[in-house]
Image (cartoon, rainbow, N blue to C red):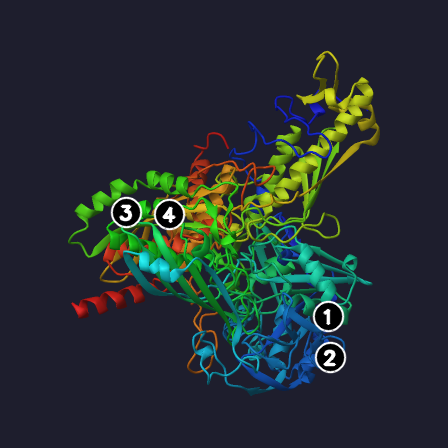
Amino acid sequence: MGSESEEKQCSCKHHKERSDEREGDGGQGISRRGFIASMGAGAAAIATAGRLSAEQKEEAIKSGELAKISLRVNGRTHRMLVEPRWSLLFVIRDRLGLTGIKEGCERGECGSCTVLINGEPRYACMTLAVEAEGMEITTLEGLMKGEELGPVQRAFVEEDAFQCGYCTPGQIMAVEGLLRHSPNPTIEEIRVGVGGNLCRCGAYRNIFRAAQRAAELKSGKGGKS
Amino acid sequence: MKQTEDKMYIDPELVVPETPHPGKPPKPWEKTHVIGKKIVRVDAYQRVSGAARYPSDMILPDMLYGAILRCPHPNAHIKKVDTSKAEKMPGVRTVISGNTPRMNPDFTYQGQGKTKVFDSHCRFEGDCVAAVAAETPYQAWDAVRAIEVEYETLPFVVDELKSLDAKAPKVHGTGNTVKEEKYERGDTAKGFREADKILEMEFRSECQLHTPLERHGCVARWDGDLLTLWESTQGAFIIQREMAQLLNMPMAKVRVIGHYMGGGFGSKLQVSKFTVIAAFLAKATGRPVKMFLTREETFLAVGNRPPAKMKLKAGVRKDGTLTALEFFGIGASGAYPAGGVQLLDWQIRDLYNCPNVRCAGTDVYINAGPARAFRAPGHPQASWALEQMMDALAQALAMDPVELRLKNVPAVSQARGGIPYTSTGLKECLREGAKAFGWDKRKKELARENGKSHIKTGIGMAGGLWFLGGGFGPATVIVKLYSDGSANLNMGAADLGTGFKTVAAMIVSEELGLRLDKIQIENADTGTTQFTMMSGGSKTTPVDGSAVRHAAAHVKQKLLAMAAKDLKLSVADLAIKGGTVVSKTDSSKQKKITEISEFKELSVIVGIGNKDPNPKGKAIEPFAAQFCEVKVNTKTGELEIVRFVASQDSGRIMNRYTYDNQVIGGITMGIGFAATEGRVLDGKQTGKLCNKSWHDYKLPTALDVPPDIESAPVELIDNEANVIGAKGLGEPVTIPTAAAIANAVYNAVGIRFTETPLSPLRICQLLAERSKKG
């Protein structure tokens, strides 16, 4: 899989324009939110430290400047330019166009943007894209084999484990992550496993059933599916 | 091209209902083959694979991102808005505000309470001040923060009870009363004289916020004078109509697309300022603009279930018959008229037999975001009062609460002047629910065993009804049957997650004998699908579902007319059997549907269906009874909801999967209303919303709901209501839930909790107060 790398330079005209405008920025890294700004600055320093030579070290990347990163998403490598403050969620959805994962709160409350990072369920809104460099990221799309649904997705269909479907990708990723750790979870483990994923439609009961069904499908005890 | 057997998509095994004569409605289904079964959703693949494109997933070439600067104060005049710094910021393409020429039209909240899109007087925290379009959402928010605004802050009132004080600041200059509603029948004074027992109690239900998972928003794009909006909405045609009015445009030049939407619960029935602003930003820049609110904004500015303060007095005879009910409620519209006491008294008026009823409601202004319809407006609030009162009356009479309710089941809709119901299943819901729950047995068990442990177990129940079971038209649906036997179903209704698309496809399948997977649905697009009202009031299945059946029947009428020409027989002699048109009198005369010459020549038959009017002089209402068991930890105040059983009468069950899913969803939302949710406004110091995030405003999570919720439906097919025999379901399922929980808590610890939410803190407080009193 690793050989399938893909160059995806984010070099639309907007970014070129930005480099002109940057001069007017006056070095003020104004950012979306205070806490993101502090996180962003820290992460930017970490992300760039390896690339900068000794004399350049003091120049931390400012807001609006772009960092060159490569992201491993669903087994493919994407080389791209990102602002250090961009969340992994924004980059996956709006830059890579993988809209399977959803944006519910952008602040680590709802779990709609759950992805697997190195096999662990994580909120993509709470991870900066620059932080995710070098990590193995799996999104909902990554559970599919071409157009074929993965076992957790099939279980969600069979058990009618959703209503509006907006939290569903996150729920599926949470269950996928859970089952990778404990292939045969108890109902309590399932409840905790999806405890960080809100469903306002309230389809939880069926989500629990889907998780149980997915465990069966994954272990080959699927029967009809 | 020859039509081969295997290419035929009509299932020859399926028996198709008789074709009605033109102008006559189809007869009720006698035996169904598809309807009522457990059918996996037709769009399940799309929703679990990421293929479903929600409005918030839209990415258009050259698209900008919009963001809105909102007033941070509950009441303030805008003295000055300076956007000059913001305009020069990186990536910013336009900034608009109340100063921008031609971009600040009048705005109303559902036709009431005139204001401006950017009003110089912001009457609630979160009203719109200015807006930005930029290349990335990050840059848009940078610019929003760089807009300099000079506010003159004004005194505010955010407590609905204080708003009626003479000294309270006036939200709109005059008094803070939006309106007063009154209802009366019989003579309550006489009723109370006849009572053996009279109880009077006060209740309060806290303001609940919708917060669907997909945030409110849209993508706006102009092509010359055509405005296209991809909006997360329950009513594409309503957004179209309201936007056309607001922008003074022809309706035909506004196209609204909302194929998928990530939850609404009533908060996405109407147009919002953000849609107007998105259209302006797109106009000003000549580029598409994506405008999705942040989560905080959805807490502030796009609706709520208003808080309700209620007083209820009830009189009852020894035998359990109610003699009088007196109800007074205060609800808050918010900063603009928005139905603060809308339908608040309906349960009191209509649920139980009672000759003497008096209700009054006062809707008030406060400096907070305007209310919006929220799943069964008014009903869960009043149920919180009425159903706890019924429980208390049963206790006072030493009568079983189920028995007390059974004593008072009404035969007619008293709130509508005594007209009959098309069907009423309240009695059946109470009986079946109690049976499924094991009510009598559990009651005896608990009477014995609920002893020494600090964890107390209790059971409770509540009944309910929803005032509108038959919905409202108009609605038009088109079914296109192709000559290979596949079909397009074209309808305006959205599928909010209720599974309506699946139900609609099942109706077509039932009526025409088509295989479900050969039916393709186009829906919720004002440019290409047919008009319907918004999906609200639990109307979509009864209304749009009926129109689907009419459209399918129309296809069959046309098909028979074409076959009649080939067979040289009269239409009246023909019936459809197993994919073939057969003569009723001579079965040797027949023609395969796919070989009817005119059909083959035309390639398609178009059937049009309209919702027929609801029956005159009849009330259509769904009924409910819910039962639950709870555990209360008397040391920590923790409340665990152990199990729930819901018995609903919503007429015919269309799809047992999606039916049950609605039931568990409604109960989950009711658990939130009862136990975890409540808007907190800082009435003393700032007037601001304290819990505008899901960390601070707690929705029920997977750990707050019982692992199993049982749906034990009562299926009373209601052929008087409409041609599919179904009543609405989405709202009635959430009405009795909270009161059932409160009654179970009472049963567990002997304290009546009259205020929501039943948080551990409140439970501890009341337990402590009781032990202080001794």
> What label does residue B408 carry, if any?
4
Q: Amino acid at mark 2?
A: Thr
Q: Amino acid at mark 1?
A: Phe
First in sequence: mark 1 or mark 2?
2
| Cα distance between the residues tagged 1 and 3 | 61 Å
Foreground mark, 3 or 4? 4
Q: Determine if residue B42 is in view.
A: no
Residue B16's image quarter?
Answer: top right
Residue in the image at 70% along x and 13% along y: B587
Residue B431 position in % (x across, y down): 36, 40
Check disc 2 and report the residue beneath it: B100
Check disc 1 and report the residue beneath it: B280
Residue B730 position in % (x across, y down): 51, 49
| Cα distance between the residues tagged 2 and 3 | 66 Å
Q: Chain of mark 3?
A: B
Badge 3 element: loop
**Of residues A157 and B734, which is closer to you in this image?**
B734
Badge 2 element: loop
Residue B630 position in % (x across, y down): 30, 52
Check disc 3 and report the residue beneath it: B400
First in sequence: mark 2 or mark 3?
2
First in sequence: mark 1 or mark 3?
1
Q: Amino acid at mark 4?
A: Asn
Residue in the image at 78% along x and 26% along y: B561
Does mark 2 fall on the same chain as mark 4?
A: yes
* Cβ atoms at labels 2 and 3 below 8 Å apart: no
